[in-house]
Structure formats: structure tokens, C-alpha cells
Amino acid sequence: MKDKFFSIKRQFGDGRKLCHALPFYLLTFLLLSCSISYKFNGASIDYSKTKTIQIADFPIRSSYVWGPMANIFNTQLKDQYANHTKLIQVKRNGDLRLEGEITRYDQRNKSVSSEGYSAQTELSMTVNVRFTNTVSRSEDFERTFTATASYESTQSLNSVQEELVTQMCKEITEQIFNATVANW
């Protein structure tokens, strides 16, 4: 027993080193074992009054059309509310109602190179939204939301279209979400 004591004393001295190191190790242990979790999704909904949302499919009403765009947009819009609220999606008579159409989808030259050719092309997408809040009619609106995305003119639209449309749909669905339930 005495040998063990002297062995420990040789390793740690007379205990002062251990006393100084102990708070550091204790604090490190506490910080690593504790975790703080904070989830902020931006929604400010009174779930005691508002329980359901009705989201109609948004058809394409623009002159320039890319077939999969409506499906990508409609899926992302429904997913936005499913993933960030506790609202139940219903086919009719929702407490909140979203309907509208994709009114514009086009491309234009964004910048010109020194040789006089287009260097970048910009895609633009606009969605018209009619929002009805049956619980608080003062929050009803009809508004347009627009997003843009650019690509190098050396690329073909077919090679980047899906990625850029998905990106623009995400941006527009976030804008709609913020305008309808985030109250920012």
C-alpha cells in the first residue's frame, strides 16, 4: 500500500498539479457531455387555431415551359410546410390556403464578354401566389415571387437546367413560406 502511495506521489507530486488540472478536466468533461440544441424554423403559427393547410398544385402559365418544373416546384412547396410546420395538409377547406401559378420562366443574357458574345445567361422564374388565412383574413394576399440563377454561356441550358430550376424553386418556396407563416 505504501508503495502505491509513493508511486502516485511520484507521478503527481504532492497533489498540487492534480488540484490545478482537475478543474480543467472537469470543465472539459462537462462541456463535451452537454449539448445545447436549438431549432428555429421561422414559423410563428398559433396551432391552437390553425391546424391545416391546403396547397393546390401550381400549373405553368408561362410562354416558355420546361416540363418537370411544375412538379419540382409543387413538391418543394409541400415539403417546405411538411418539414417546417406541424400543419396537416388537406385537399380542401384548409385553415391556410395556397394557390397560384408559375407565370414566367425565361432566360436572358446577363453579361457580355470582351469579344461581344454572351458570357453569362440568367434564368428567371416568377410565381404568382394567392394566400388565404381563414383564421385571420387580414393576412390574406396575392403576390408574385421571383428567383434567378445564372450559368456560363459555354454550358448548354439542358446540362444545367434541372439544377438551376431546383435552386430557384427552393428560393421561391422559402420566400412563400416566410411571407405566409414566418411573419418576419
Image: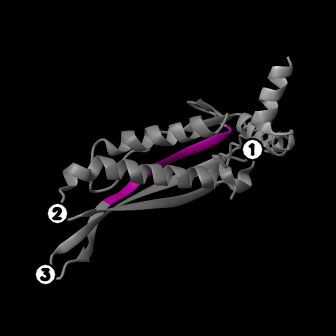
Q: Amino acid at mark 2?
A: Thr
Residue 87, image x and y in percent? 66, 34
Q: How is the image coloured?
A: one colour
Residue at which label 2 appears: 154
Q: Is residue 16 rendered to the left or right of residue 92?
A: right
Q: Nearer the viewer, residue 111 or 12?
A: 12
Residue 118, image x and y in percent? 19, 73
Residue 70, image x and y in percent? 37, 43
Q: Is residue 154 rendered to the left or right of residue 42?
A: left
Q: Quadrant of the C terminus?
A: bottom right
In the picture shown, does residue 117 fall above or below 173?
A: below
Residue depicted at x 21% and y 72%: 119
Residue at which label 3 appears: 115
Residue depicted at x 67% and y 34%: 86
Name the mark nearer the viewer: 3 or 1: 3
**What residue range appears in magenta?**
95-105
In the picture shown, does residue 39 fall above or below 144?
A: above
Residue 110, image x and y in percent? 29, 72
Q: Quadrant of residue 59?
A: top left
Q: Amino acid at mark 3?
A: Glu
Q: Amino acid at mark 1?
A: Val
Q: Secondary structure at mark 1?
A: loop
In the picture shown, does residue 122 fall above or below 91?
A: below
> In the rendered structure, are the residues bearing label 2 and label 1 in contact, judged by CB atoms less than 8 Å apart?
no
Residue depicted at x 60% and y 42%: 97
Q: Is residue 175 rendered to the left or right of residue 68?
A: right
| Residue 43 visible in the current orientation | yes
Residue at which label 1 appears: 135
